Image (tube, grey):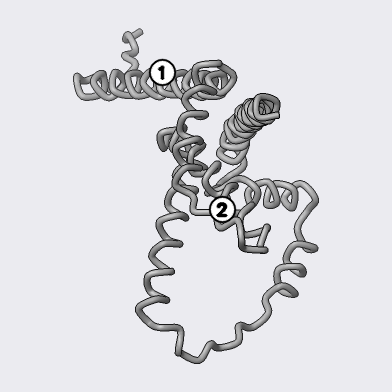
């Protein structure tokens, strides 16, 4: 009985190199994912540190000093909006552009300045065309979506720069944005308490 020889395709050096490349790429992807997760958790945790709150407080005071408020103006909403924009801008600068929401806040500020410059150059004498209402179309689209997708879309609108992002990106950005907002509230509360205490001390010394 003749010995049967099982014919199989020989393993060449190119096949081995391909397998090695696949293993290396898979290991690199896993390492990148672990680094991204560690960086994300560290970025969330850094908003809870005292040093980060001090950095933001200094940037907030600097931003508020550049806000021009007219005390004789009766428009209180404008003054409040200017303070809120300065606080958000300082928060985005403190994030150093490492997140989508911080980059979105900074770029929106630049776009707003560019639009104001264009309006000043144009003089505002052009005839403004009435925009067609699209609210009804958006409502119809929103009603046709499932409840989970509607909530994801709403969350994407609340977080700057995440309007058209997928769910994992929205959740990651929302976690970092919420932690940053909590730190912002703590810093502004401490600053308000400091200012009120100094005002009371100055009033007591003058009386």
Q: Is residue 151 visible?
A: yes
Q: Is residue 43 left or right of residue 145?
A: left
The residue beneath circle 1 is 31
Instruction: Please count the marks in the image.
Output: 2
| Quarter of the figure that contains the N terminus | top left
| Residue at mark 1 to residue at mark 2: CA–CA distance | 43 Å
Residue at the spot x=46%, y=33% of the render? 59
- Residue lying at the far left in this picture: please name it: 13
Q: Position of residue 44 (x, y in %)?
A: 56, 24
Q: Position of residue 32 (x, y in %)?
A: 41, 23
Q: Position of residue 164 (x, y in %)?
A: 56, 53
Q: Residue 82 bears which disc, if any?
A: 2
Considering only vertical position in the picture, is 86 above or below 140? above
Label 1 environment density (alpha carbons within 10 Å; few <14, some 14–19, many ≥20): few
Q: Is residue 36 left or right of residue 157?
A: left
Residue nearest the observer in this picture, 134 or 179: 179
Residue at the spot x=56%, y=48% of the render? 160
| First in sequence: mark 1 vs mark 2 | 1
Label 2 environment density (alpha carbons within 10 Å; few <14, some 14–19, many ≥20): some
Dot 2: element: helix
Considering only vertical position in the picture, is 195 above or below 51? below
Residue at the spot x=50%, y=36% of the render? 60
Q: Is residue 182 visible?
A: no
Considering only vertical position in the picture, is 39 above or below 85? above
Residue nearest the observer in this picture, 194 or 62: 194
- Residue lying at the far bottom in this picture: please name it: 127
Q: Position of residue 61 (x, y in %)?
A: 49, 35
Considering only vertical position in the picture, is 175 above or below 39? below
Residue at the spot x=52%, y=49% of the render? 161
């Amino acid at each position: 009985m003749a010995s049967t020889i099982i014919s199989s395709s020989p393993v060449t050096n190119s096949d081995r190199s391909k397998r090695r490349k696949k293993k290396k790429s898979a290991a690199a992807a896993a390492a990148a994912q672990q680094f991204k997760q560690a960086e994300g958790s560290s970025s969330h945790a850094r908003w809870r540190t005292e040093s980060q709150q001090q950095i933001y407080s200094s940037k907030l005071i600097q931003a508020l000093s550049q806000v021009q408020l007219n005390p004789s103006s009766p428009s209180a909403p404008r003054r409040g909006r200017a303070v809120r924009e300065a606080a958000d801008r300082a928060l985005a600068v403190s994030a150093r552009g490492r997140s989508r929401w911080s980059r979105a806040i900074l770029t929106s500020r630049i776009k707003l300045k560019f639009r104001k410059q264009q309006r000043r150059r144009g003089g505002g004498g052009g005839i403004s065309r009435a925009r067609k209402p699209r609210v009804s179309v958006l409502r119809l689209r929103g009603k046709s979506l499932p409840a989970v997708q509607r909530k994801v879309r709403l969350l994407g609108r609340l977080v700057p720069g995440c309007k058209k992002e997928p769910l994992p990106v929205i959740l990651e950005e929302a976690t970092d944005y919420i932690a940053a907002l909590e730190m912002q509230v703590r810093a502004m509360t401490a600053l308000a308490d400091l200012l009120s205490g100094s005002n009371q001390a100055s009033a007591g010394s003058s009386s």
